[in-house]
Image (tube, helix red, strand yellow):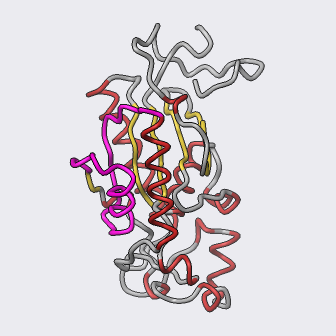
Amino acid sequence: MGEGRSFMTTVLLLRHGRTTTNATGVLAGHQPVGLDEVGRAQAVKVGERLAAAKLPLAAVVSSPLPRCRETLSLALPDVTDVIEDEGIIECRYGDWTGRPLSELAKEPLWATVQAHPSAAVFPGEGGESMAAMSARAIGAIRSWDARIAESHGPEAVWLACSHGDIIKAIAADALGMHLDLFQRLAVEPASVTVIRYTPLRSFVLRLNDTGGDLSGFQPPEKAEGEPSSDAAVGGGSGGSV
């Protein structure tokens, strides 16, 4: 199997730009908050990176929350057929929603969220467990990836815009990490995390990228050979494929 010659569908996971609640240290949850001035600038900047890379996005999927839709409207203004999916919506934080993080850090549950998130269940009506959040998000992304590969071919590139904890959970799964370790990952506003799924394993090609060149994810004009799950022994020749 030729190194870097076989391709599988690639997903770019875009976190929304900074919001008014991010800036003030409040847990937004499902509140319909918008981007602040910094967040809008971040969305425009990531859009410039995507435009420069000239990636032919086979699909754009989004969390239904306004901060994700606003990010996409600024980053990809020419894309009119964004697909909303509840599977990648923000975690349902229940009674924690809208409260300052500095206040939440004093709650007994905070230590569980930090050290044992797979056991964390947020209190109050509609509160979700972090395990359920992780399972639905991973399921949604993998389902979309399979559908896009089937309809557009294994070399297709697509984008999903979501939230910090959601993307961290998806990246942790792709890395083979238990959810209890996902707090070791950082996913900043308007960052791009890139994953390629294959039948045997997933490859994390970028994590929390806030300024890199994305043109390396341009699909080949014609994929050579069958899609491979093999990793390049010795580390490969560099690049994104």
Q: Looking at the image, which residue is at 51% across and 89% down?
A: 99
User: Which of the 4 image quadrants contains residue 85?
Assistant: bottom left
Magenta extent: 53-82
Q: Quadrant of the C terminus?
A: top right
Residue 238, image quadrant: top right
**148 sits to left or right of 41:** left
For this rendering, which residue is in front, 72 or 13? 72
Q: What count of labels does the image hold?
A: 0
Is 233 positioned to the left or the right of 12 in the image?
A: right
The residue at 37%/85% (across/down) is: 125
Residue extending furthest toward the left: 81
Out of 241 and 95, give the one closest to the viewer: 241
As displayed, is residue 61 above or below residue 19? above
Name the spot of residue 109 as percent of width and height, x first: 62, 83
Question: What residue is shown at x 58% (from left), y 37% (from top)?
Answer: 213
Taking the view exactly as shown, the residue that stands out farthest to the right is 234
> In which quadrant will I find the N terminus?
top right
Residue 127 point in image, percent of width and height? 42, 79
Residue 73's place in the image compared with 49, above or below, is below
Residue 204 position in % (x across, y down): 60, 38
Left or right: where 140 falls relative to 134? left
- Residue 154, x across and y down, in percent: 39, 23
Q: Residue at x 61, y 51 (%)?
A: 208
Q: Decide whether residue 95 is among the magenta residues.
A: no
Residue 78 within the segment the image draws in magenta:
yes
Q: Along the horizontal axis of the image, is 17 left or right of 179?
A: left
